[in-house]
Image (cartoon, rainbow, N blue to C red):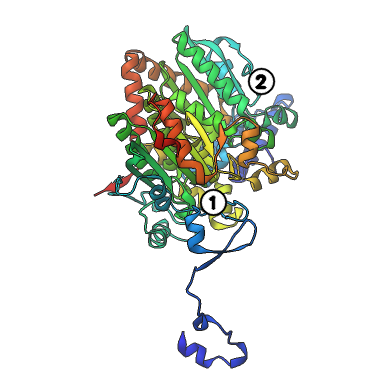
Amino acid sequence: MNLNFLDFEQPIAELEAKIDELRYIGDDADVNISEEVSKLEAKSKALTQSIFSSLSPWQISQLARHPQRPYTMEYIVRLFTEFHELHGDRCYADDHAIIGGMARLEGMPVMIIGQQKGRDTKEKLHRNFGMARPEGYRKALRLMRLAERFRLPVLTFIDTPGAYPGIGAEERGQSEAIAKNLFVMSGLRTPVICVVIGEGGSGGALAIGIGDRTLMLQYSTYSVISPEGCASILWKSAEKAEEAAEAMGITATRLKELGLIDRIIEEPLGGAHRDVDAMAGNLKSALLEELNQLSGVSLDELVENRYKRLMAYGQFTDR
Amino acid sequence: MSWFRKLMPSKIRTPGGNKRSIPEGLWIKCSGCSAVLYRSELERNFDVCPKCSHHMRIGARRRLEMFFDADSIEEIGTGLEPVDILKFRDSKKYRERLSAAQKDTGEKDALVVMRGTVDGMPLVAAAFEFSFMGGSMGAVVGERFVRGINTCIDNNIPFVCFSASGGARMQEALFSLMQMAKTSVALKRLSDAGIPYISVLTDPTMGGVSASFAMLGDINIAEPKALIGFAGPRVIEQTVRETLPEGFQRSEFLLEHGAIDMIIDRREMRTNLLSILGILARKPTVTSAAG
């Protein structure tokens, strides 16, 4: 079993392994097997298509947390030029779970803020699994205010299981750090576009998630609590995560239907991790389009529209 | 049940039930020091144990009635009722949970907002009903909160919120998370209008409520020994795999770490809030405000 593939991806993994093997043989044998390879490739494509045409919310939540899923930095290097990373909250520390800095997108100056996960064990620990502490949110806040002063649009990339639940994080005011970000972002006088690129986990995600547009990659998720967390509280068993994922409506498609997000960015066949360059391309054109639309709006109007957007969240009856 | 009781052999029948001669709830055991307290005496003492000063949890309506001048109250957002837009169902349907909570508490949702006067000073105050699904925040809580704030902006009067909540309401999924955003942007407007907002954190204030409006007060005040934090203590313990320090996430801990301005005993809350609001509003001293 290939650990870089999820359960439901295993049939694809087996085919791919066969193709690789054939290619390897083909390289040093005289026999021409390219025909066989292309046949298998077509089969693999069809198989992927059929598996991915009917993914359950639970499968999508696994894809959003796929070990090979591209993280913020992989998009930064593909989308932007002149990226200058900015560090630290000026109070306590530099949180490696959130990266940020200024850069250019097709020449246009922007501020980037995103949660960053790690790929191997060492990097995972360094990035704290993408779970920010208060200093991470305060760094983000500092960069947003900087962006506002110099009229740089803010682009945020959301990918976190949630804010870090630790002793030090509580001591340094995790709640206040998140709350302050919501407060400031809601009135920030510069365009803000938020993209959920993987896992949009709860308050830790929302703390860099208030803006004029919320976009989601096709196989990303956004939820108030992880399916496992929800299951262990409401069903009293983490094994009911599959049901919880279904009930909460955490997928891009469902959230678009519910009017909670604005746009879904299509992923390449088999998910973003199968073709990071293509994914980056789709993301870039979506960002450029949205930025273009927002650049024509006056700052007063921008903030007023954002206020109305936030006010519209939630349904109730009023008699 | 009576036919079933008759069938039961006498040996397994438990005495009691009908035998109770003391009216229910006349005596209450303090959850702090276990002293047995006379209910009416406890109520006169604002539900604070006279022996050990333990602050018992109290309901939203009682909290607000204690706070406002009698007969000055007008409730805001009474027509609002929750809807189950996701048709959410865990071991129970959300709709069933809602009606059970509504029946138990007599409230439509977990937040009660009122406009009135406190010693003659007009203001809006909101209070959480913790016994309504753990004081969790869904769309109705968010909307009532915002309407309270809008009343403040329209009338240029201060806003006070007494929070007691486990956080976001999972049954409303992402809608409940977005209430954090909604309440925060409303507070931004209130702040821009130059109107003071005092957040009073009571036991317990956690998760999405603490990580939004509860921590955004111009002044943050806590009741003694209230549990206040972002992540629950059990979640933290499981994550860091060490025992949490004594008094972790209690009001005194937050004061020590600079998260709140002060801790005020419930019995002195009203006088102190009045005084603080008076100073922020640059009002001349009123003698009765000191008493």
- Residue B46, position as x, y percentages in the image: 49, 52
- Residue position marked by numbered label 1 in the rendering: A242
- Rendering quarter of residue B183: top left
Between tags 2 and 1, which lies in front?
2
Q: Do tag 2 and tag 1 residues touch (Cβ < 8 Å)?
A: no
* Residue depicted at 46% across the width and 8% down the height: A150
Q: Looking at the image, which residue is at 47% across and 49% down?
A: B135
Residue B40 spot, x, y in % from top left: 48, 62
Up the image or down, A289 lies above or below B250; here it is above
Position in image of residue B253 (x %, y %): 65, 38
What chain does mark 2 sit on? A
Q: Earlier in the sequence, mark 2 or mark 1?
A: 2
Image quadrant holding the C terminus of chain B, namely top left
**Residue nearest the observer in this picture, B290 or A178:** B290
Q: Is residue A229 left or right of residue B172?
A: right
Tag of residue A94: 2
Q: CA distance from mark 2 to mark 1?
A: 36 Å
Give the residue type that dot 1 points to: Glu
Front-most of residues A31 and A188: A188
Give the residue at x 42% y 56%: B94
Amino acid at dot 2: Asp
The percent position of residue A202, horizontal first and vertical second, equals 52, 38
Subunit under mark 1: A
Q: Nearer the viewer, residue A190 or B255?
A: B255
Residue farthest to the front, as pictured: B287
